[in-house]
Image (spheres, rainbow, N blue to C red):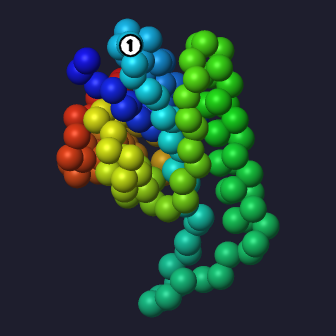
């Protein structure tokens, strides 16, 4: 068995949906493999001069609600595929949160989309996928 603990990063984007499809396919082809779907989100921060500007609680609540709906979408996609998988919601910078999670869980493969829903920095490979590829200690499958 090549990979037994597969982690798919999911943010609801088109590339993340393709990555989740590929992760589901890999799990179905590998008897005994497990799948964990991870959605990592971070609360917005606004820099003003040398510090942070306060963010209204309602904005943070909106970000959390969006994250929860993304997790529910992932749970539904996995269920429709006929699999049982763990779906985790992580808070923090997405690449760091994902890398920390796979290390703690002793995972052996990360499946991630080439571009996510990020902002302006996402134009090249995608800042999250690029960061994950550069710093992961396990194989990373980037799905386009």
- Horizontal and vertical percent for residue 56? 74, 74
- Horizontal and vertical percent for residue 55? 67, 75
Tell which residue pokes out farthest to the right in this image: 58
Judge left or right: residue 141 versus residue 95. Answer: left
Judge left or right: residue 33 versus residue 36. Answer: left
Is 21 placed above or below 137 here?
Answer: above
| Residue 76 visible, this orientation | yes
Tell which residue pokes out farthest to the top in this image: 29
- What residue is shown at x 69% (from left), y 56% (from top)? 64
Please tell me which residue lies in front, 106 or 61: 106
Tell which residue pokes out farthest to the front in this image: 32
- Which quadrant would residue 26 be assigned to in this image? top left
- Horizontal and vertical percent for residue 84? 58, 23
Is 86 placed above or below 28 here?
Answer: below
Judge left or right: residue 106 versus residue 55. Answer: left
Q: What residue did someone put label 1 on? A: 31
Please tell me which residue lies in front, 2 or 125: 2
């Amino acid at each position: 068995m090549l990979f037994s603990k597969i982690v798919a990063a999911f943010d609801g984007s088109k590339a993340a949906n393709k990555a989740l499809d590929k992760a589901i396919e890999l799990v179905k082809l590998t008897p005994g493999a497990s799948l964990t779907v991870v959605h990592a989100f971070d609360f917005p921060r606004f820099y003003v001069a040398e510090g942070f500007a306060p963010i209204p609680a309602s904005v943070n609540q909106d970000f959390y609600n969006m994250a929860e709906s993304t997790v529910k979408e992932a749970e539904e996609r996995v269920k429709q595929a006929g699999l049982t998988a763990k779906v985790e919601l992580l808070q923090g910078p997405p690449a760091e949160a994902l890398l920390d999670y796979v290390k703690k869980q002793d995972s052996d493969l990360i499946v991630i989309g080439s571009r996510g829903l990020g902002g302006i920095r996402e134009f090249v490979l995608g800042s999250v996928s690029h960061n994950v590829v550069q710093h992961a200690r396990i194989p990373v499958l980037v799905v386009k």
